[in-house]
Image (spheres, grey):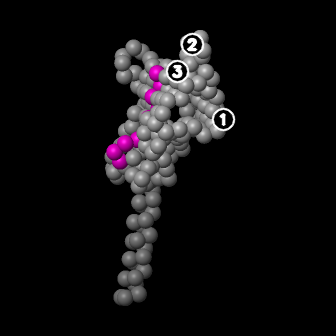
Amino acid sequence: FKDGNLNVDSFINNGLLRGAGTINPYSPDGAIVTLENNGTVAPGNSPRNLIINGDYTQTEWGVLEIELGKSSYDILEVFGRVSLDGILKVSFYDGYVPEAGTTASFDFLKASEISGVFDTITAPDGWLCSLDYLDNDGDGLKDAIQLKMNPVPVPAALWLLASGLLGLIGMKSRKKTG
């Protein structure tokens, strides 16, 4: 799906939906229809926006894949309600890695109302993800999700172990030369 409009009267994704553009899930009588994700939804053509003019439900089997790049990232924008479950899979795009020692933030999902949470978040190796559910318009409803990426901290015990081993190696080499 690339840069187009898809008009459907029902939409259940059991496979892979990847692309940028607009999906209009409306019934013939004009009622809003829900796009149900039991498979994988991957917004953008690396990275870009996927717009849904309706509701979006991600089931426990569903996966939402988000790619993060240096100057842009994938966004799922839903002009309706979102109900979450399942997996959020985060990856870096085109060699991008957030700057060390900083927290990188990305508003990757926007909707009129968001309920539920992802059961699982998978991140690139060496990175931790956290999510903030935001009320940007002040109406008391969650309407955006912000992803924060942080490098996995190296435990202090590891630094102590490494410095202790270096000290032992230094003492051993002093004995050999002395």
Q: Main secondary structure of the magenta part?
A: loop
Mark 2 or mark 3, earlier in chain: 2
Q: What element carries label 1?
A: loop
Instruction: Name the quadrant containing residue 62.
Output: top right
Vertical placement of 113 versus 69: above or below?
Answer: above
Q: In which quarter of the image is the C terminus?
A: bottom left
* Res. 133 in view: no
Task: Residue 9 in the image: state x and y as whole percent.
Answer: 61, 21
Q: Do the residues labelled 2 and 3 touch (CB within 8 Å)?
A: no
Q: How crowded is mark 1: few (under 14 residues within 10 Å), some or many (20 or more)?
A: some
Q: In this rendered view, identify the residue nearer to me: 97 or 41.
A: 41
Q: Name the kind of residue labelled 1 in the image.
A: Asn
Q: In this rendered view, identify the residue nearer to me: 142 or 163.
A: 142
Task: Residue 105 in the image: state x and y as whole percent.
Answer: 37, 39
Q: Find out whether residue 76 is within the magenta segment.
A: yes
Q: Name the kind of residue labelled 2 in the image.
A: Ala
Q: What element carries label 2?
A: loop
**Residue denoted by label 1:** 14
Residue at 42% from the left image edge and 76% from the top image edge: 169
**Between marks 2 and 3, how big is the CA–CA gap?**
9 Å
* Res. 172 in view: yes
Looking at the rendering, the stretch of residues picked out in magenta corresponds to: 70-79
Q: Find out whether residue 173 is within the magenta segment.
A: no
Residue at 48% from the left image edge and 25% from the top image edge: 78
Residue at 35% from the left image edge and 47% from the top image edge: 70
Q: Do the residues labelled 1 and 2 touch (CB within 8 Å)?
A: no
Mark 1 or mark 2, earlier in chain: 1
**Residue denoted by label 2:** 31
Q: In this rendered view, identify the residue nearer to me: 121 or 161.
A: 121
Task: Residue 118 in the image: state x and y as whole percent.
Answer: 55, 33
